[in-house]
Image: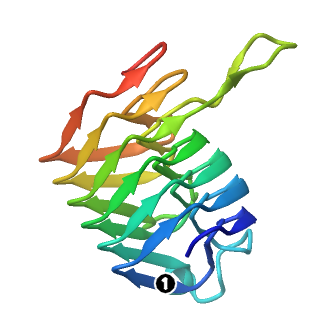
């Protein structure tokens, strides 16, 4: 997919079961979240058949590059279960979670897993509100998580956050399980480079 622009998921919006194998997703823009891919339930309540019918996303051997989201998830935004494996999330931009943003789902059993994936060179841009002089966005350039996230055998490097969490930012509602991974040469203007 190349060159799409929408409010959620510049290239792909998923409210079903999506498996993307050996794909290249680039040059997309979202005026909301998910510059390339937005994986979320379009309904606010649990589906009538439980977790088996929540949207799921699998990206395998995917390259997701040069995508922009005005809010969260320059490459990928997810609020339901997702697996990103043997992929590259590279040179994406967003206020929060420029590579990957995991939203808090509020549902038990919803987990995002990142395995053997490179998340590199992403920018969490952010800004300072001129009226309040408070920072907004600019958090978690590689990964920003407010949900349950497992990262294994992955490389999160050379990401830049204007505020905090150059490599990874975990919010007060987030849970991160990080193992056998490299978090290297990330930068943040204030905290957690």
Residue at 42%, 67% in the rendered image = 109
Please say if 170 is above or below 24: above
Whether 111 is drawn above or below 144: the answer is below
154 with respect to 119 (left or right):
left
Q: Who is closer to the viewer here, 30 or 144? A: 30
Q: Quadrant of the N terminus?
A: bottom right
Nearer-the-camera pick, 15 or 7: 7
Hey, which quadrant is residue 129 in on the image?
Answer: top right
Q: Secondary structure at mark 1?
A: strand
Q: Residue at x 51, y 44 (%)?
A: 98
Q: Residue at x 50, y 36 (%)?
A: 123
Residue 18: x %, y % from top left: 49, 84
Q: Which residue is mark 1?
A: 18
Relative to 120, say whether 67 is above or below.
below
**Colour theme:** rainbow
Residue located at (47% from left, 45% from top): 145
Nearer to us in this view, 132 or 111: 132
Report crowding for label 1: few under 14, some 14 to 19, many 20 or more residues within 10 A (C-alpha).
some
Q: Residue 140: x percent and y percent?
A: 47, 35
Q: Give the vertical position of 52 relative to 131 (above or below).
A: below
């Amino acid at each position: 997919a190349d060159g799409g622009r929408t409010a959620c998921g510049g290239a792909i919006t998923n409210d079903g079961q999506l498996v993307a194998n050996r794909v290249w997703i680039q040059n997309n823009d979202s005026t909301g979240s998910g510059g390339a891919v937005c994986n979320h339930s379009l309904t606010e309540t649990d589906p009538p058949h439980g977790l088996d019918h929540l949207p799921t996303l699998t990206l395998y051997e995917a390259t997701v590059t040069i995508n922009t989201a005005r809010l969260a998830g320059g490459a990928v935004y997810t609020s339901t279960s997702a697996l990103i494996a043997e992929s590259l999330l590279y040179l994406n931009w967003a206020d929060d979670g420029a590579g990957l943003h995991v939203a808090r789902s509020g549902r038990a059993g919803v987990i995002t897993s990142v395995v053997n994936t490179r998340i590199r060179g992403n920018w969490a841009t952010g800004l300072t509100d001129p009226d309040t002089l408070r920072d907004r966005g600019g958090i978690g350039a590689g990964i920003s998580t407010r949900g349950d996230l497992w990262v294994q055998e992955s490389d999160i490097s050379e990401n830049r956050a204007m505020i905090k969490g150059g490599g990874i930012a975990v919010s007060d509602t987030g849970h991160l399980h990080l193992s056998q991974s490299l978090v290297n040469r990330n930068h943040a203007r204030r905290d957690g480079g």
